[in-house]
Amino acid sequence: MSKGMRISRRQCLSGALAGLCAVAGGTRGAFATPAGALPPDRIGAIDRLLTQAAGAGMFDGSLKIEQGGRLLFDRSYGLADHRLGTPFAPDAVFRIASLSKNMTDAALAAMAARGELRLSDRLDRYLPRFPSADRITLEAITQHRSGIPHTNDQPWGDGATSFSHDELLDRLAGLPLAFEPGARRSYSNGGYAVLARVMEMVRGQPYAELMRDLVFAPLGMHRSGAIADSRLTPEGWARGHAPGTEIGTRQPARFYAAETRPGGGSLHASAHDVLRFFGAAWRRRLPGAEAFPSLFGGDRPRIGADGRAPGFYLDVYHVREADLIVSSVANNYAAEFRWAENIARLALGEAPLYPALPELDLERPADPEWLGRYRNSDPRFSQDLEISRNGSDQLVLHDRATGDARALLPLRGGGQLDPLYFWACRRDPAAGSIGCGALYEGGFGATLLRVA
């Protein structure tokens, strides 16, 4: 769909845009393959959900489901590059964001299994000048209990500027600890940057090379590696997108220097490689997996892992008793944070968190009562938001702090769907506020409070 296109009732009814009007169509990649042993009704339910999301501009990428090593579902939706109209190749490469941490953990376990280091080693053994290094263990870093500050929380940590691993470590060393080591848990990309340096020192190899030797080559992950320069999108790589400012469209994701997240967010992989890795990791088939189960999810009966960076969202989920793995690898920033779990439920014939996306009503004009300035009730989100109207009479939510914007999707029966978080939003006329929440009970949400 071209940017700025109006969608008429005739187009909806004719079927040309049926996937967008009823959110039941969409685009599927050229290499869609038949499923193996999933019953047809479950295949249909999963395909409808993915097709809905792609048609609404909320998904581009690959979905794979395997059970006991047998691939049951392998389809792609959307495009690898919307600007060029490029479909997905079977070995298309994606930035894998924080799934990099799982792979770094696997390399760390392999080093520990070889006796090259111990998880109980304190940081001062390797980086004696790093602040409080005598109180931080390598294991605490993997558990996000080190107190090393989260890179993303720093004024220079939004990924807009690229700098070296050395410079990143210097910046982290100049910051106070976020909390006393071991006192609590708080997610930290900074911790993994420090861990990656320790691993380099022990192995005498750059991070990219040690990951190749310890993880990628042994598993046959031939399309995996470290991102060296985020300004480049090599041939065969998926380009990052976000939901666009017209319903159903995409826009290029903002620049994000993944190389400033060494150890924690700097890797790339194909969808096949992601599935291959987690199949080996969660089935304890990697060196050190039995000795260091905490690095591989422990003994939880159901476990997930996800990663998100501008333009990409990856979500992987394992149901241990059924030995089923769902791997969703997307070059679209839209994220529903129990996405792979929901698909696993559909695949197993369990009650899903939500069977489908809510139906849209694209004929409804923009409601002027929604227009205005807002702040988010959750301080972790932007406090300077505005809802305006685009040239196609659609509501657009602007983040005035970042410049990001996306069209809201009108829901049948009232309200709007925020495509970035899969949130259903409804306006409270009395308060003038907008309440947004997940598509399932108990999910995460937020309230937008009108300020002007």
Image: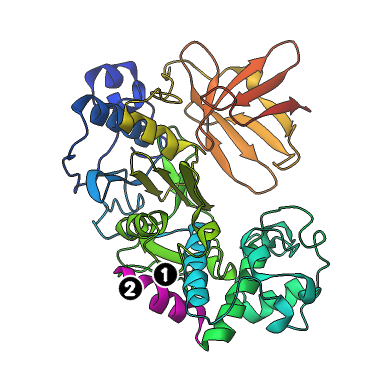
Q: Start and end of the magenta stretch?
A: 205-220
Residue labelled with disc 1: 287
Element under disc 1: loop
Rate crowding at label 1 as few (under 14), some (14 to 19) or many (20 or more) other CA atoms within 10 Å.
many
Q: In the depicted view, which residue is nearer to us: 392 or 100? A: 100
398 relative position to 212: left or right? right
In what quadrant of the picture does the N terminus appear? top left
- Disc 2 target residue: 218
Residue closest to the eye, 73 or 122:
122
Q: Disc 2 on helix, strand or loop?
A: helix
Give x and y (percent) for residue 220.
29, 69
The residue that appears at 82% across and 61% down in the rendered structure is 180
Eye-nearest disc, 2 or 1:
1
Residue at the front extreme, as displayed: 291
Q: Which is more N-terminal, label 1 or label 2?
A: 2
The answer to whether residue 164 is left or right of residue 66 is right
- Residue flagged by tag 1: what amino acid is it? Pro
- The residue positioned 45% from the left and 63% from the top of the image is 289
Is 217 above or below relative to 36? below
Q: Mark 2 near mark 1, Cβ–Cβ under 8 Å?
A: yes
Q: Main secondary structure of the magenta part?
A: helix
Seen from the viewer's position, the closer of residues 219 and 432 is 219
Which residue occupies 40% across, 22% down? Answer: 351
Q: Is residue 393 visible?
A: no
